[in-house]
Structures are given as C-alpha cells and as structure tokens.
Amino acid sequence: MQLTSESVSASAGMVALVFGGRSPEHSISCLSAKSVLGALLELGYEIACIGITRDGTWVEVASAEVESYEITASHHPEVAKSDRVIRLVMNAHAPGIEIDGEFRPISVLFPVLHGIGGEDGAIQGVCHSMGIPVVGSGVRASAICVNKLTTKELVRAAGVDAGDWFPQRKAAITVAPPTDAFPFPWFVKPVSGGSSIGISVVSQLQDYEQACQHAFRTCSDVIVEQGLVNPRELEVGVLVGESGIEASPVGEIKVKDQFDFYDFEAKYISDGAELIVPAELDQELMREIQRLAVHVFTLLGCAGYARVDFFLDGDRIVFNEINTIPGFTPISMFARMWAHAGVSFPQIVDRLVRVAVS
C-alpha cells in the first residue's frame, strides 16, 4: 500500500481521536491513543485529540500531552481535567466539535476507548445518530462482542467450539456455582471487560465467592469458564481492506512461569509473556485458525478490525473472545502480527480511516 500525506488529506478531513473514558481500562486507552496519534501525524492527518476524563467530561488534550503518556508500576496515565471542554454538535452543514464557542467540523471519529463506553456501542450510537463515520465496528456488533456470554452463545450456535462456561449474576440470591459444574480450574471473569482486569483463577470452591466479588467490582455479571490444561494461547488480527476481510498470521502468547495467566501486570507492567509471531503451527492448522477468525468476525457483524483469541488444546481449537478495539500500540500483538505480514502500524491506521469514510 502506497501512503502519502497528499493522498491522505484528499480523502479525509479532521480525525477526532477519542480516548480515556470511565472504563477501568482508561490508562490502556491513553497508551493506545499515543500510538495512534503518532501514526496519524506521520500520515499527515488533521487531528483533534479528545480525552474523556474518568468522570465522563470530554476535553481537548494537547498532542504533546498525549505523546508523553507512559505506564509504570507506580504511574498510570490518565486524561486530566481541563477548562477546554468539548461538545459534539451538529450545525447546519456538518457534525463537529465545539470548544469555547468555536466550531470545528470532523470527518471521522477514531475511538480507542477500551471497555465500557467505547467497545459496547455507546459512542458508536452517538456517532450514528449524528451521521459521523466511526472507525471500527458499529453499535450492534460492539454491544454483542463486549459481552462475553452473548458472544460465546452466538459463536457456539454457529458451530464453533467455545469451550464450557456458566453465568453468575450479582443479583442472584446466592453467589454459588451450579451443582453440576465442570471440574476446576475455573476462570472467573467480568462479562464485559478487558485487559484482564477483574479476572481470577479458582482452584477450590471456597475461593469462588471472593473471586466473583472481585469481578463484580468491574461488572454486575460474571462468566465462569472452564480452564484447559496447558493450552496454547493464540491470537489473530482481522482487518478490513480494499480487497475484503483479511486475517493476519497467527501469534502465540507464552506466559512466564511467575504468572498464573496473562493478567494486567504481565501485559503492561512486568514484561510477563513472550509474544511469538508467527506461532509455530503447521500451515493447515494456521489456515484453519485464520478461517475461524474471519468467520467469527463476519458472524458477529464486525467492521474495520478486531483481534480474535483462541486456545489450542491438543488438536482442539477453542474460541476464547473477540476484541473490537484491541490494545493498539506498535508493540501490541495486533500490530506485531500485521507487521509480520508486511503491514506497518501507520498503514493499519490509514486503512482503518479510509474504510470508515468510504
């Protein structure tokens, strides 16, 4: 793909890059915004950086501030409160943003809001009602895919192995598993959430309620999945382009011994996993996992891009989850997998904007 600033500016006006939000994944969203901003600047786009504070206020954020975001064990970036409050508005001619009474038209909104408020269809619905093109999946697909229970039920109904699970609701009279529950270990997860926030591994019944209460701090509903014995964790990046829906080479995550699973610290703080691209698979198995990733993406009505995650248990391919706004930095697995296929991070970003406005 040939990219030039001239061709970009001819195809799109201002890109509104939206990040932060009320989700527990606020800080990861800020890191994704930093990476996307760098790519948009390299490509020559006109950009409005819109941060959503933890209390839900939309504010203008300077590019230099976004570029300074870093995460450490003791510091997580966040959108600071500001007097530069932004409103989405519709004037007589076009949708746009208003800052201190000044109107700026926008051509496309690029959300890197992970979790609730971004991946659940909320911001997509706002954009749809105002006629603003949005990068990535729309309202329905976003709402479906953010809910792990709904996603697994639909995927299983389509004939794809999605493992075994049962739901646990906070509103239930008692927090207890069904009497015929599958054997341990169990992975207790918030139904709607990402970045491994709120997840626990349970190996004995007496730890179950505590694990549920931990997950309930993130979401009112929990999904309890049966853990597999030493499965391989595999991921595929799905990307929509001019030639249709494409799947990246399959990547593999190998979690280091000090971690029980690929949790928040392992992902973002402690370099707790080895990311291998491409995964060591025979070509037939690689193609089948890629086929399943595209099948799931299409089945759920996704658009733009997504990361589809699987477990490989012997010869059994088990669907784990789909992320419609995955971690989106040049070192994230999504970017690494596409880089191996010869598609750079700026090319990914440019393709997403072009598809959204087409």
Image: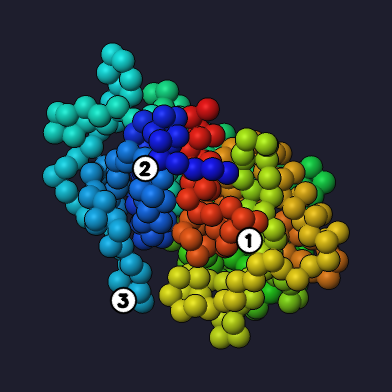
Secondary structure of the residue carrying tag 3 is loop
Quickly name the residue at label 2: 44
Question: Is 340 on the left or on the right of 64, as rendered?
Answer: right
At a point 77% along the width and 56% down the height, the residue shown is: 289
Secondary structure of the residue carrying tag 1 is helix
C-alpha span from label 2 to label 3: 34 Å
At a point 72% along the width and 56% down the height, the residue shown is: 319
Label 2 is placed on what type of residue?
Gly
Quickly name the residue at label 1: 340
Quickly name the residue at label 3: 74
Label 3 is placed on what type of residue?
Ser
Mark 2, Cα crowd under 10 Å, few <14 / some 14-19 / many 20+, is some
Q: Position of residue 98 (x, y in %)?
A: 22, 30
At a point 83% along the width and 70% down the height, the residue shown is: 314
| First-in-chain label (2 vs 3) | 2
Mark 3, Cα crowd under 10 Å, few <14 / some 14-19 / many 20+, is few
Can the viewer see residue 109 in this picture?
no
